[in-house]
Amino acid sequence: MCATQIDPQLLAIYQHSDYRVSVAGQNDFLLRPGLPSPELLAVYQRYAVSSACFISAYNPRSEPRTLEENVAAQQELLKAVEALGHSFLPGMGEDSEGGCAGEPCLLILGISRDQSLNLGTRFEQNALLWMEADAIPQLLLLR
């Protein structure tokens, strides 16, 4: 693993969180770092894409913000994704042990790795999930 400025306890939370994706008319599914997702492969086929990013704009650098600040940041992320022309699905990043509140996220479909990293940096996130054609989520650290 590369050197990071992220607190080891916070990093452990990221690695073991539930990254929940909502698909209209279907059951939600979970993404977990390092584990293949057949549900994501089905989404890839449905949208004719071969990559995705799971990201939130809430609590930049994991520093708590007000609900109003977080909602505004998430709306800016949504606008940025729409400007890039990508489809997306709503999601929620949840600490599987319940120690941290969940954060609304987006599963952005067909986005490139570079675009994902740029969004993560722009919205000052510590990390994001990146998925290539194999639909195995990778935790990418941004700090």
Image (tube, grey):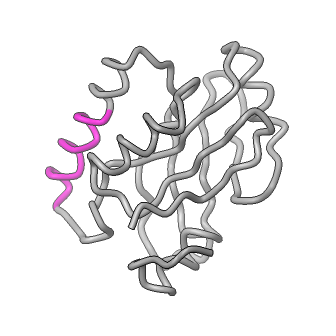
Is 31 situated left or right of 127 in this image? Answer: right
Is 80 situated left or right of 143 in this image? Answer: left
Q: Name the spot of residue 84 as percent of width and height, x first.
A: 37, 19
The image quadrant that residue 42 belongs to is: top right
Task: State whether residue 89 is above or below residue 73.
Answer: above
Is 99 situated left or right of 15 in this image? Answer: left
Residue 89 seen anywhere in this rendered image of the structure = no
The verdict on residue 42 being magenta is no
Q: Name the spot of residue 66 as percent of width and height, x first.
A: 16, 61
Task: State whether residue 32 is above or below residue 71.
Answer: below
Q: Residue at x 53, y 61 (%)?
A: 94
Task: State whether residue 84 is above or below residue 41.
Answer: above
Q: Residue at x 69, y 59 (%)?
A: 33
Q: Name the spot of residue 125 as percent of width and height, x first.
A: 35, 58
Q: Name the spot of residue 8 as percent of width and height, x first.
A: 50, 86
Instruction: Tell me where the magenta segment starts and ends, as one range.
Output: 66-77
- Main SS category, magenta section: helix
Q: Residue at x 32, y 49 (%)?
A: 57
Residue 15 seen anywhere in this rendered image of the structure = yes
The image quadrant that residue 22 belongs to is: top right
Viewport quadrant of the C terminus: bottom left
Q: Residue at x 72, y 25 (%)?
A: 43
The image quadrant that residue 64 belongs to is: bottom left
